[in-house]
Amino acid sequence: MKIAFVGKGGSGKTTTSSLFVRFLGSLDLPTVAIDADINQHLGAALGLTEDQAAGIPPLGLNMAELKDYLRGDNPRITSSDSMLKSTPAGHGSRLLQVNGNDPFHQKFGRHVAGATLMATGPFAEDDLGLSCYHSKIGAAELYLNHVVDGRDEYVVMDMTAGADAFASGLFTRFDVTFLVAEPTRKGVSVYRQYKDYAKDHGVKICVIGNKVEDEEDVTFLREHVGDDLLTWLVPSRFVRESEKGRTPDFASLETQNVSALKVMLAEVNATDQDWVKFTRQGHEFHRLYAERWGSRSSGEDLTRQIDPDFVMGARPAA
């Protein structure tokens, strides 16, 4: 299952996603974690030092290599240079598996907290004033377009703050989107944006309350997000110790917060994985990008990269 963590800046999105990754790791479930936030703090939240996190080869700075690898011998893709971030997999493409023993995961992944961590990478000095962060996230979108995750396998992405995911088709790549919200007016504002933008695309949004101190906070969240409130986390001594650079045992996480993580995992596992919809939406957004600017920029019709007889899922991976 593919899971996104989104929310307002400062809502605790990275902290919550790291707790969920740690929880999956504690259960020995195959997990890939992707830091796609411009601030790149997921590695530290999972227990890496700053130097260790900085040593992960950034996906966003290796787009040419990524495209060349994922292209494989797909005859519909004339060259890796012609690939867009939206280019879908087809016959001949290299498909990836969660924690797969392949050159891609070996080079760009690092094992931490029971998961394989990858990162889109921070802004490079050459990017300043010349490009937006969406060019980095495009690498993660290509990854999601080519990874086949099976039952009890998880890809968890810590997204950029706010509603930036809607600048591309990335928001349709997930089976479940967890929106982290504090019990404040600003905390629920991103929820309303996300809900409105996603309403026509079948995106499953579950709200995770964070820093919830009492029943009044729960009532506030219910008033603003209704039945989309799935569960909530309480203030955590474990999190505070982790943020100070210490390494508390995950078993010391508060009972309420462990219970919340169990609810989140149960919700994910109860969600149907719709590969037909995943493939169709990928084709729709790629066609949109190709027709609006991609084909004109490359000088060829990039809609031809769409393989109409190919559907992502367990069968192609096998």
Image (cartoon, rainbow, N blue to C red):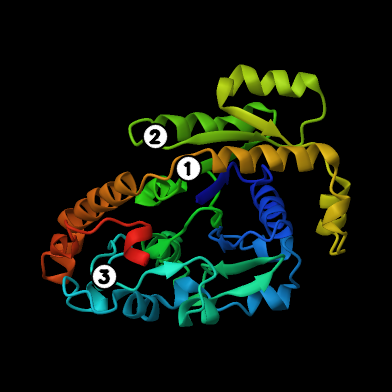
Q: Mark 3 points at which residue?
A: 83
Q: In this view, does 296 lie above or below 7?
A: below
**Marks 1 and 2, how far apart at CA:** 9 Å
Q: Residue at x 70, y 41 (%)?
A: 262
For the image, the number of numbered tags is 3
Position above or below: 299 against 237? below
Circles 1 and 2: CB atoms closer than 8 Å: yes
* Residue type beneath disc 1: Ala
Q: Mark 2 points at which residue?
A: 197
Q: Nearer the viewer, residue 19 or 168?
A: 19
Q: Which of 183 and 232 is in front in this view?
A: 232
Q: Quadrant of the C terminus?
A: bottom left
Looking at the image, residue 61 sits to the left or right of residue 215; the answer is left
- State the residue at coordinates (82%, 29%): 213
Question: Is residue 65 shown left or right of residue 227?
Answer: left
On the picture, is 286 further left or further right than 194? left
Q: Is residue 300 visible?
A: yes
Quarter where residue 303 is shown: bottom left
Task: Give, as a three-letter code, the residue at label 3.
Answer: Met
Q: Earlier in the sequence, mark 3 or mark 2?
A: 3
Tell me the crowding category of disc 3: few under 14, some 14 to 19, or many 20 or more residues within 10 angstroms, Cα based.
many
Residue kind at label 2, given as amino acid type: Tyr
Q: How far apart are marks 3 and 2 (CA)?
A: 26 Å
Label 2, secondary structure: give it: helix
Q: Tag 3 or tag 1, which sits nearer the N-term?
A: 3
Disc 1 and disc 3 in contact, CB within 8 angstroms: no
User: Residue at the spot x=20%, y=62% of the render?
Assistant: 294
From the viewer's side, name the closer residue of 176 and 87.
176
Q: Where is residue 186 in the image (x, y as percent from the top left)?
A: 62, 31
For label 1, the residue is: 163
* Residue 90 drawn above or below residue 152: below
